[in-house]
Amino acid sequence: MRSFEMESFNLIEESVERLHWLIKLRWIAAVAVISTVLFTNQILKFSLPNFPLYAIAVTLYVYNLIFFLLLLPPKQRNSLITINRIANAQISLDLLSLAALMHFSGGIENPFIFYFIFHMIIAGILLSRRASFLQATVAVLLFCFIVISEYLGLLPHYCLRGFIIHDQHNNLIYIWGVSFVFISTLYIAVYMATSISSRLRQREKVLKETNELLKEKDQLKSEYVLRVSHDIKEHLAAIQGCLEPVAGGITGELNPKQFDLVQRAVRRTAKLMFFVRALLEITRIKLSKEIKMDFFSFKDVLSETVDYITVKARDKNISVSSTLEPSIDRIRGTKEYIQETITNLLANSVKYTPRNGKIEIKVSDKGNSILMQIKDTGIGIPRDELPKIFDEFYRASNAREVERDGTGLGLSIAKQIVQRHQGNIWVESEEGKGSTFHIELPK
């Protein structure tokens, strides 16, 4: 039931978006009508009835404004029936306006009569096939009414003197020829538009269902990984609890060979524990519906993180500098996650930057967001590997050469955290010259 409601809501939102697109086109059409009348009168010197044409343009503007206001309140989005009625009303009024414009600007002699086709294509996109063909029939009836009425003299004919040589509104052969082409083109346009639109909607539905299925499977996989990782972590903790007393000599003195073997086991267990913790961390982030956010001092977080990293960087004689624009202080987010992300990125910079290198941190105020740049003179990332660098378990080839052990989860966790904060993270890098990581976070 919830899935059906969500699907219905998405369909309504898409329909409303398309109607807004139609409204935008109508603003342009209203301006185009006025501009065309001015151009034909002032430049081409055609004799057209100005008042009716300007009145049609104003009417177009007025009812377009009404539809724009109708689509603003959320209450109008409560059902597809309401949206379909608005869509039908818009297209029907457009056909009436276009028919009136056609009558006052040459009737069947006006080449702009084929603009009816655009509305048929729009109807095929917005409406059902049945409604689209009904709109096409309305267009045909309006067209025939004007042509027949002008032919019989029931309506006055406004000839486009200067554009055509001979008056054609009473030429029966011309009327039959243009009418046949016009009517057949309308119905063909509707058939093609509705067929394509129907296929696209069907494909879109299949893709949405497939995407939902993939999300469900991914969640099941994550839940499974979470349970298994948690069990592994408990066993590893028990193993560590047994190894550490032995390595510390509590159970008795070890000979050199025994001590070496136990130390290897301690190191391997520690690395495996680090990997499991990282796996648990990224799985928890992916499974959590939302993360708790509050305002915190970004200035303090950056200061603490830089102090921590500077100590580690001294061992390799790497200089660490940071600049923060004075206007930046408190932002909204999860302090622990943000601090962990910055720490991991800076730790990577220290790890993959050779001795006597340099790390520069710059934080800029972008109004509603902040932009953090972490630039180092490290080994860089191969150009063809840049698109994969944020993938889970992926490590750059040159990074594996520097350090064999690594989870390949650090950057993936950073990306998950930044995205959960509605931010963005990306990297610019050149192999052998260094990397610059960019993190944009909303305030």
Image: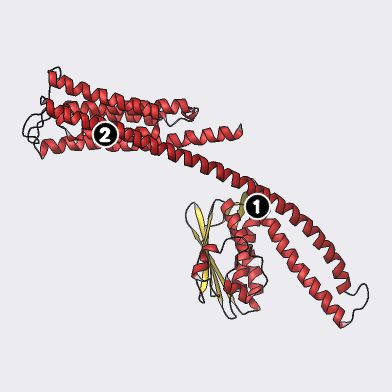
Amino acid type shown at disc 2: Thr
- Residue sticking out furthest to the bottom: 256
> 10 Å neighbourhood of mark 1: few (<14), some, or many (≥20)?
some
- Residue sticking out furthest to the top: 154
Q: Quadrant of the N terminus?
A: top right
Q: CA distance from mark 2 to mark 1?
A: 55 Å
Q: Nearer the viewer, residue 388 or 170?
A: 170
Amino acid type shown at disc 1: Ile
Q: Nearer the viewer, residue 54 or 272?
A: 272
Residue 243 place in picture, x, y as percent: 85, 69
Q: Is residue 33 visible in this depiction of the protein?
A: yes
* Residue 244 figure quarter: bottom right
In this figure, which residue is indicated by the disc labeled 2? 185
88 on left or right of 303 = left
Residue 47 place in picture, x, y as percent: 9, 31
Q: Is residue 55 visible in this depiction of the protein?
A: no
Residue 255 place in picture, x, y as percent: 89, 81
**Above or below, comparing residue 7 to residue 392 in the picture:** above
In this figure, which residue is indicated by the disc labeled 1? 285
* Residue 108 figure quarter: top left
* Residue 168 figure quarter: top left
At a point 88% along the width and 72% down the height, the residue shown is: 246
104 on left or right of 315 = left
Sequence order check, earlier mark of 2 and 1: 2
- The structure's colour scheme is secondary structure
**Above or below, comparing residue 437 to residue 95 in the picture:** below
Q: Nearer the viewer, residue 307 or 129?
A: 129
Identify the mark at residue 338; answer none if there is no mark. Answer: none
Q: Determine whether the residue tagged by mark 2 lies in a helix, strand or loop.
A: helix
> 10 Å neighbourhood of mark 2: few (<14), some, or many (≥20)?
some
- Total count of labels: 2
